[in-house]
Image (cartoon, helix red, strand yellow):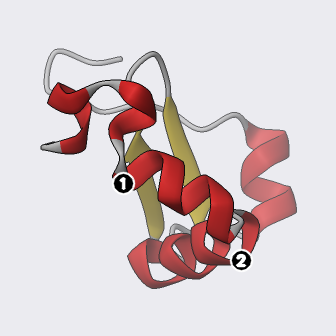
Amino acid sequence: MSARGQMSLPAPARHRWGLDCGGKVGYLDIGDAVLVVPGGVENLRREVLESVSDQDWQLARAGFGDPDLANE
């Protein structure tokens, strides 16, 4: 992490994701980690929506039992 907040993506990931010459990535801060997805925010939304079940969405909307989280 640079002083300006920039990070380097390891070469194997850049090659696999086709980002050798740059490109869009989307990120999601999940608290203890940051999820980085190639293809920008639109692709991130699609990936998240496709990977989370309706039951998981309901639990998340309810704050996983924590009313403070439900308001975030």
Residue 25, placed above or below residue 46: above
Disc on the earlier residue, 2 or 1 = 2
Q: How many marks?
A: 2
Residue 3 percent across, percent down from the top left? 16, 15
Crowding at label 2, few (<14), some or many (≥20) Cα neighbours within 10 Å? few
Residue 46 percent across, percent down from the top left? 59, 82
Which of the image's four quarters has the N terminus?
A: top left
Look at label 1 and name its amino acid.
Answer: Arg
Position of 36 with respect to 4 (left or right) is: right
**Residue 50: image tag:** 2
Q: What's the residue at 38%, 23% (across, down)?
A: 31
Position of 13 with respect to 61 (left or right) is: right
- Between 14 and 55, the one lying in front of the other is 55
Element type at marker 1? Answer: helix
Q: Quadrant of residue 40?
A: bottom left
Residue matched to label 1: 61
Position of 36 with respect to 16 (left or right) is: left
Q: What's the residue at 44%, 63% (across, down)?
A: 26
Look at label 2 and name its amino acid.
Answer: Glu
Q: What's the residue at 21%, 30% (across, down)?
A: 67
Judged by depth in the image, the label closer to the viewer, 2 or 1, is 1
Element type at marker 2? Answer: helix
For the residues labelled 2 and 1, the Cα–Cα distance comes to 17 Å
- Between 44 and 64, the one lying in front of the other is 64
Crowding at label 1, few (<14), some or many (≥20) Cα neighbours within 10 Å? some
* Whether residue 20 is visible: no
